[in-house]
Image (cartoon, rainbow, N blue to C red):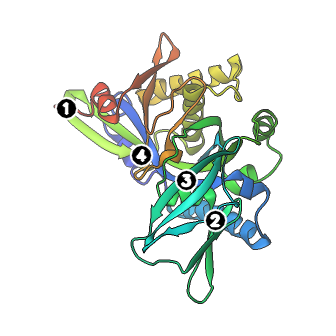
Amino acid sequence: MTRGFLNFMQDFPDYDKAEKSWHITLDRSDFFWYDLVVKPPSEDAGKALKKHLNDFKNFVELNNEKRFIYFFSTREKVRFNIKKQPRFVMFSKRKMYVHLLMGNNVKKKVGICFPYDIPGKVTVDEKFIYLYDEDENSIAYSVHDFLKICKINLGIDSKLLYVGITEDPVARTLGRKHRGLTDILYNVPTSENDIFLTVNTFKVGCYTNFKNNNINIMSTNSMIYDIPLDKEGLVIEKALIYYFKSEFQESDKKAWGEFRNLLKMMKEKKNICLVSFHLELNEPTEYDVIGSKEVRPRISHSFLWQLNNNEPSLIIFDNEIDIMKYSGVLKDI
């Protein structure tokens, strides 16, 4: 889909002067355990990862070009306990116990149920669990994919370390020449923590209020194209950087000035008065409970940025509904 196919709306009388707000939500989020990026279990696995991200990139370019916003995060290390292989419950092959090692080798036993296909045999090594059928064919899941798929909660939350932007997630996030990643790997004790990469795209909703005509229009920036693609991506990146305020991503006055100038440009050219965010997946797991040094871990984050005395000002909300009320999108609720 071509960006800006509804840009004729900008020709409406008083369109530029009409008050607008952006509401930004997650469109797609792909999660990777970075240990398998650095040291893939096989050559084919490494190629599959690159193909997955290239397919993601090509899909976005073909359907609705966007910038990729990526996160590096960390949470307490989890491995399978190879000294205690999985075992089925006596008299029931539908339930199985799996033994884990967390952090500094803290032992944990978790139970899972197989509602449909029951594997003939299950084994583990430190990083993978292998499920075998009757013909000894196997399928493997990493420990983190296994925990996510089975929605097993261990009481662990994630800490966001870095927010970045790229046109090419393969070249940027899988390459080793990344200063932010170098700082993370140097400062985060990987003996007790795992590092994760999340590659995201966002949907930028645009709400336009023609007060004099009592007309409201809800669309997206990609359709109307008020703000160019590169500027749209930078607004998202910097808004997230300054919300989470990771200690691994200290920003100087120049970077803050760039963020301020982006918000001023949007206000002066198109009267976009605020930029709100709601970060939450449709089917979240414990891996999506994320915070930072400055932000307490939550499964969802709702906040907005607006100019106050020509400086970016942050307001945090409890939920998405409160944001929509504040921005005037929901007036009668």
- Nearer the observer: mark 2 or 4; the answer is 2
Earlier-in-chain disc, 3 versus 1: 3
- Mark 3, other Cα within 10 Å: few <14 / some 14–19 / many ≥20: some
Going by the image, does 225 lie left or right of 294? left
Earlier-in-chain disc, 4 versus 3: 3
Q: Which residue is mark 4?
A: 224
Going by the image, does 169 lie left or right of 270? right
In the displayed orientation, state which residue is furthest to the top.
309
Question: Can you tell which mark lies on residue 5?
Answer: none
Secondary structure under tag 4 reads helix
Image-quadrant location for residue 325? top left
Q: Which residue is mark 2?
A: 85
Going by the image, does 213 lie left or right of 251? left
Earlier-in-chain disc, 2 versus 4: 2
- Mark 2, other Cα within 10 Å: few <14 / some 14–19 / many ≥20: some
The CA span between labels 2 and 4 is 56 Å
The CA span between labels 3 and 2 is 11 Å
- Mark 4, other Cα within 10 Å: few <14 / some 14–19 / many ≥20: some
* Amino acid type for the residue under numbered disc 4: Ile
Earlier-in-chain disc, 3 versus 2: 2
The CA span between labels 2 and 1 is 69 Å
Q: Which residue is mark 1?
A: 213
Please tell me which residue is depicted at 79% across the width and 42% down the height of the picture. Answer: 178
Q: Which residue is mark 3?
A: 109
